[in-house]
Amino acid sequence: MSKRWLERRKKDYYYRKAKKEKYRSRAAYKLIQAVKKYNFIHPNNVVVDLGSAPGGWLQVARQIVGEKGFVLGVDLKEVKPLNYENVHVITGDIRKEETLRKIKAILPRPADVVISDISPNISGIWELDHARQIELTEFALKIALAVLRTGGNFFTKVFQGEFFNQFLDEVKRHFNRVEIFKPKASRKESAEIYILGLDYK
């Protein structure tokens, strides 16, 4: 990590806010802002968080669902436990069938919401990064379609680029309402945008 990047991060409003409010990442505010606008996670919900490391979205989801809800995180990296009885994390690759089997085995019932902030390792070659991210997001959608209840919601990060519209159309096929959202907490220069599928058919 370059010195300039570290300096910029220290000045970053959401980075400082996350430190102060004890969120594990500034990305927590992207989910907070999206839920505030679209109200797609509720108390007592069952939530699956794909690409959950370091745990910022897990923290936000747990705050919303409360003690009677259930949150399951999935990531290739190990996630430091949140120490709530109703928050579980599995280490696994969302592209593998065994990970989907594990998710289904742990969920107490079909999920109300699937959220995904998943990213590939960034190479700096834009076309490659976009294609890799879309591939991961397609797997996230596949998991959502396999575990969501009818009427459930799906919220995912997507990199803008040539495959964006194709993926958006795919989400529209499965959800009755689809929104595109750029949270204030997303950096202006970032090509990330979020797709929200509401009311799974």
Image: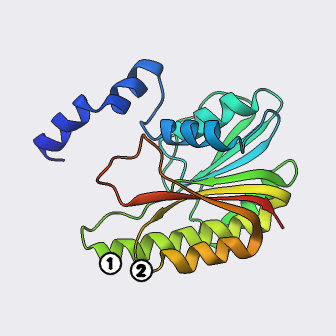
- Tell me which label, 2 or 1, sits earlier in the chain: 1
Instruction: Please state the horizontal and vertical placement of residue 199, each as a whole percent of the image.
Output: 80, 58
Where disc 2 sits, the SS reads loop
Q: How many marks?
A: 2
Image quarter of residue 99: bottom right
Q: Amino acid at mark 1?
A: Glu
Q: Provide the residue designation for mark 2.
A: 162
Tell me the crowding category of disc 1: few under 14, some 14 to 19, or many 20 or more residues within 10 angstroms, Cα based.
Answer: few
Q: Amino acid at mark 2?
A: Glu
Where disc 1 sits, the SS reads helix
- Mark 1 and mark 2 in contact (Cβ < 8 Å)? yes
Please indicate whether residue 89 sits to the left or right of residue 144 in the image.
Answer: left
Tell me the crowding category of disc 2: few under 14, some 14 to 19, or many 20 or more residues within 10 angstroms, Cα based.
Answer: few
Q: Provide the residue designation for mark 1.
A: 127
Please indicate whether residue 10 sits to the left or right of residue 77 in the image.
Answer: left
Instruction: Please state the horizontal and vertical placement of residue 194, each as a whole percent of the image.
Output: 53, 57
Residue 95 is marked as none
188 up-or-down from 171: above or below = above
Q: Residue furthest top?
A: 20
